């Protein structure tokens, strides 16, 4: 379905059509990957808690979110001037 605009050049339309083809190909590839992902059998149980060994701020945050979801409390991230954050 090509929509032509009165003021567009032939070069613009050609490039726009190439972009549309690439977008459609990307959508189709994404759908194929999603289908393959859905076909995967249930994987093995992971027994290692990877968040424990992470030393970044993001890793600490993810570890705390996971712990909170599991009902554990860990205390504040840091304390300053009597205020805990």
Image (cartoon, rainbow, N blue to C red):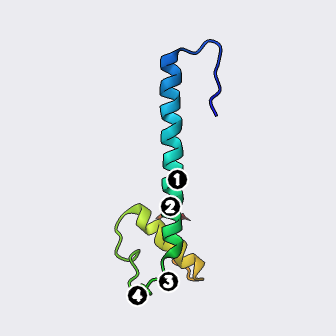
Q: Mark 3 or 2, which is nearer the eye?
A: 2
Q: Which mark is residue 28?
A: 1
- The N terminus lies in which quarter of the figure? top right
Residue picked out by circle 2: 32
| Residue 77 visible here | no
In this rendering, the label closer to the viewer, 1 or 4: 1
Name the residue: 53% across, 23% down: 13
Residue 46 in the figure: left or right of residue 4: left
Disc on res. 43: none
Question: What residue lies at 52% left-to-right and 42% top-to-bottom?
Answer: 23
Q: Residues within 10 Å of mark 4 (few under 14, many from 20)?
A: few
- Name which of mark 3 and mark 2 comes first in the sequence: 2
Is there any visible trace of residue 65 in the rendered image? yes
- For label 3, the residue is 42
Q: Earlier in the sequence, mark 1 or mark 3?
A: 1
Earlier residue among tags 4 and 2: 2
- Label 1 crowd bin: few (<14), some (14–19), many (20+), radius 10 Å: few
Mark 4 secondary-structure assignment: loop
Q: Residue at x 49, y 83 (%)?
A: 42
* Mark 1 and mark 2 residues within 8 Å of each other at the beta carbon: yes
Against 41, residue 83 (above or below) is above
User: Which residue has dot 4 on it?
Assistant: 47
| Vertical placement of residue 31 versus 12, above or below | below
Give coordinates of residue 27: x percent, y percent.
54, 50
Q: CA distance from mark 1 to mark 3?
A: 25 Å
Give how far apart the Cα atoms at labels 1 and 4 are: 36 Å
Report x, y in % for residue 82.
53, 64
> Horizontal and vertical percent for residue 16?
52, 28
Which secondary structure lies at badge 1? Answer: helix
Answer yes or no: do the residues labelled 3 and 2 have beta carbons within 8 Å?
no
């Amino acid at each position: 379905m090509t929509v032509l605009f009165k003021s567009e050049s032939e070069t613009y339309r050609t490039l726009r059509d190439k972009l549309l083809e690439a977008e459609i190909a990307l959508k189709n590839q994404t759908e194929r990957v999603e289908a393959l992902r859905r076909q995967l059998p249930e994987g093995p149980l992971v027994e290692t808690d990877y968040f424990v060994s992470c030393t970044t701020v993001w890793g600490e945050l993810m570890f705390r979110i996971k712990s909170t979801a599991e009902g554990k409390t860990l205390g504040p991230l840091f304390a300053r001037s009597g205020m805990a954050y």
